[in-house]
Amino acid sequence: MEDITKQKHLKFKEILAYSLGLFGFQAIVGLLFTYQAEFSGSILGANVIVVAILVLIAKIVSAAADPVVGNLVDRSKSKLGKFKSMIVYSILPLLITTAIIFVKVPFKGAGLYVWIFIMSLIWSIAMTMGDVPSQGIAAALTPNPTERTNVVSISNTAKQIGFSACAVIVPIVCLIVPEGSKVIVPKGQQDAPMIDKEFLFVAILTAVLGCALFALIPLVNKERVTNTSSGTIGFKDMFAALKANKPFMLVIISYFLGFGRQMAMGIQVQTSTIIFGSQNLVVVLGIVTAIGSMISMAICPFLIKKLDEKKTYIILSLWGFVASIFSFIIGYFFFDNPDNTVLKILFFASLFLIGLQFGAVTLMPMIMTADCVDAYEYETGKRMEGACYAILTLTIKVCLALGMAVGLVFVGASGYYDLLDSGAFTSKSKDIIFFAYTALPGILALLSIIPMLKYDIVGEKKAEISKALAERRTEK
C-alpha cells in the first residue's frame, strides 16, 4: 500500500478557495475585534471597558452554540457535506449582523448597553455557525497528514492576513467617504477620529466581500475524510470524548494560557494613536506585524518536518517571549526619545520580530487539533471533528474577547480616553498601553508552553496513527 504521506488529493483551486474563504471570514472577525469597542466609545458614547466586558460575557453566553453547532456538524447527513452545509447556513446571518453592529443607534444609558450585548450575542452565534465548520473541514479535506499540514499552513497565512485586513481597509475608506461634520483634529494628532458613516461603510464593505469569499469554501472544496464511527454521537458521548482526549485538552489549555497574544490586536488602534498620533496609521502596525506572522506560518511546515509540532510550538513561544520583552524595553526608551534614529529603527524592527511568533497561536492549534481528531479515532473508532473544532473555536472566541477586555482595562488605566481630545499622551500612559501590547502577551506566551511539554502526538506515534486509519478506510 502506498505511503499515506505520499498521496496527493487536493487541487490548487481547492487550496486557493479554502484560503480565500478563511481570509474573507477572518476579515469580518478582525473588523469586529479591532473596531467594535472604538465605535461604541467614540460614536455611541459607551464606556469601552464596559463594552469589552459585555462582549466577553456575550462570547461566554454564546458558548452554548459551539457544542450545538459541532454536534449538528457531526450528525449531518447533508448531500452537500456536513461541514459545507453549515457554512452555507451561516453566510446570511453573518453578513447582516456585521453591518447592524456598526449602525449609529439612538439608544442611551442602559438601553445602549442592552443593545450592544444583544447584537454581540447574535453576531457571536452567527460567527460560530461559520467558524466551527470552516475550521473543522481542514481535517476532512485530505487523509494525508503532510498535505493537511501544508494546506493549513497556507490557508492560515491567508487567515492571518484577513484578520489584519481592516488595518488597510479602514484608512482607504476614510479617504473616500466625505468628512461632512467631522470633528476638528485634536492638537498632537495627525487626523480626526472616524465618523459614523466611515464605520458603517467599512462594515458593509467588509461584510459583503468577506461573505462572498467565504462562500468559495462550500462551492469549491470536497470533503474526502468521512465519519468512520459506527453510530450517532450524543452530547454525553461528545463531552466524555473530549475529557478523554488528553492531547486535545493540552492544546486547549495551552491556548487559554497564551490568550495575551490576541490582546495586541484588540488594542492596536489605541496603540497606533499613542505612537503615531493617528488611528489610520494602524496600517503601519498591521503590516509590520503581519509580515512577521506570514513568515512565521510559512516556515512552520519546515520546522515541523525537521523537528515536530511540539518542539515547533515551544520554539515559537519562547521566541515570542524574548521578542516581546525586547520590544517593550526599546519602546520604553523610544517614547522618551522619538527622534533618535537608532531607537526608531530598533523599535520597528522589534515589532516585526514579535510577528514571527504568531505561527504558534494561529497555525499550530489547527494542526494539532486535526492530529488529535485522528488519534481519538484511532483509539475509539469515533471521529469527531465537529466536537473538537467546536471547542477550539469556542476557546479562540473567548480568548479574543478576554484579550480585548484585558487590553482595554490597561488602556483605561493609562488615561487614554481622558487625554485623547488633547492628544498629549504622557510617557507613562504610553508605557502602560505598550506593556499590554508587547510585554504581557510575551509573558503569557511563555506560560502557554507548560501544557505542551506533555503533548505526544508527534513523530512515529503520529505516523503509526495515520497509517492505521488509512488501512481502516481502505478496508471499508
Image: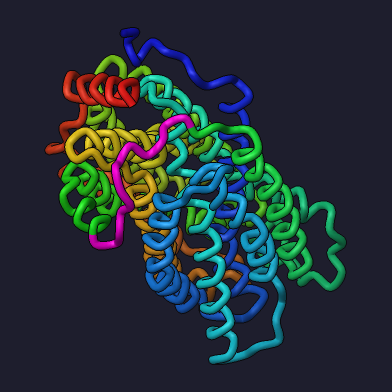
Q: Is residue 218 visible?
A: yes
Q: Quadrant of the C terminus?
A: top left
57 displayed left or right of 92: left
Identify the residue at horizontal 69%, vertical 52% (top origin): 206
The quadrant in which the N terminus is found is top left
Instruction: Tell me how many marks there are.
Output: 0
- Taking the image as shown, residue 212 lies to the left or right of residue 69, namely right
Front in this rendered view, residue 457 or 186: 457
Question: Any magenta on residue 221?
Answer: no
The residues colored magenta run: 224-236
Placement of 233 over or under 68, stated as above or below: above
Q: From what the image shows, is residue 20 above or below residue 459?
A: below
Q: Position of residue 159 (x, y in %)?
A: 53, 39
Tell me the quarter of the picture where residue 228 sits: top left
Direction from residue 393 to residue 319 in the image, left or right: left
Image location (x, y in percent) of residue 422: 62, 71
Q: Position of residue 467 (x, y in %)?
A: 26, 19
Residue at the (54%, 52%) spot, across then down: 86
* Left or right relative to 145: residue 109: right
Rendered residue at 53%/76% (across/down): 418
Q: Which residue is at the far left? A: 454
Q: Is residue 412 visible?
A: no
Q: Nearer the viewer, residue 329 or 179?
A: 179
Q: Residue at x 46, y 78 (%)?
A: 50
In the displayed structure, 121 sits above or below 372; it is: below
Q: Magenta region's main secondary structure?
A: loop
Find residue 470 and report its image quarter.
top left
Identify which residue, 300 or 147, lies in the foreground: 147
Q: Position of residue 4 (x, y in %)?
A: 34, 15
